[in-house]
Image (cartoon, rainbow, N blue to C red):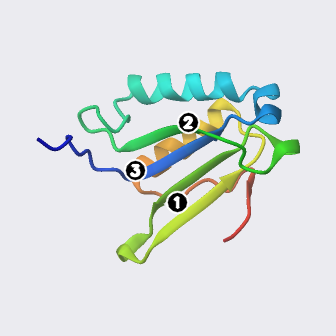
């Protein structure tokens, strides 16, 4: 028997490197996970579509907590990636909401490739 598959609209990664942990990434991850659970956005919940993962260092050590989002581009033309520095819970919740609703991702604190 194969594992159950849950459709995913986006994958969010929260850095858990030492510098980001010193800037609150452990609490950010827990708060975001609780938010996804309460809103039924977690990928295994009914209607949920977001995966949330703790990651190793994402490389923006002086600007953490860092969050990265990967999601399919419109028309199935690859993956969109968005990188965020100095993420707080309200921003993380907005990012998650936009990813779930398949809306444009926030520009606030975004860096990296367009």
Residue at the farthest left position:
1
- Circle 2 SS class: helix
Q: Are marks 3 and 2 in contact (CB under 8 Å)?
A: no
Q: CA distance from mark 3 to mark 1?
A: 9 Å
Position of the C terminus, as image quadrant, is bottom right
Say above or below: 11 vs 77. Answer: above
Which mark sits nearer the N-terminus, 1 or 2? 2
Is residue 49 rendered to the left or right of residue 107? left
Q: CA distance from mark 3 to mark 2?
A: 12 Å
Residue at the farthest front position:
1
Residue under the point 57% across and 22% down: 30
Residue under the point 56% across and 56% down: 105
Q: Are marks 3 and 1 in contact (CB under 8 Å)?
A: no
Circle 2 is placed at which residue position?
A: 93
Q: Residue 55 at x, y = what percent?
A: 61, 41
Circle 1 is placed at which residue position?
A: 104
Residue under the point 48% across and 22% down: 34
Q: Which mark is residue 101?
A: 3
Q: Quadrant of residue 38?
A: top left
Q: Residue 102 at x, y = what percent?
A: 41, 56
Residue sitting nearer the eye, 76 or 26:
26
């Amino acid at each position: 028997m194969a594992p159950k598959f849950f459709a995913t609209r986006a994958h969010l990664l929260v850095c858990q490197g030492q510098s980001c942990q010193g800037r609150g990434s452990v609490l950010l991850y827990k708060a975001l996970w609780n938010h996804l659970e309460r809103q039924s956005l977690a990928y295994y919940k009914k209607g949920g579509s977001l995966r949330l993962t703790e990651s190793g260092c994402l490389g923006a050590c002086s600007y953490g907590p860092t969050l990265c989002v990967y999601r399919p581009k419109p028309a199935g033309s690859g993956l969109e990636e968005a990188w965020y520095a100095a993420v707080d819970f309200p921003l993380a919740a907005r990012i998650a909401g936009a990813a779930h609703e398949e809306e444009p991702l926030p520009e606030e604190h975004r860096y990296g490739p367009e």
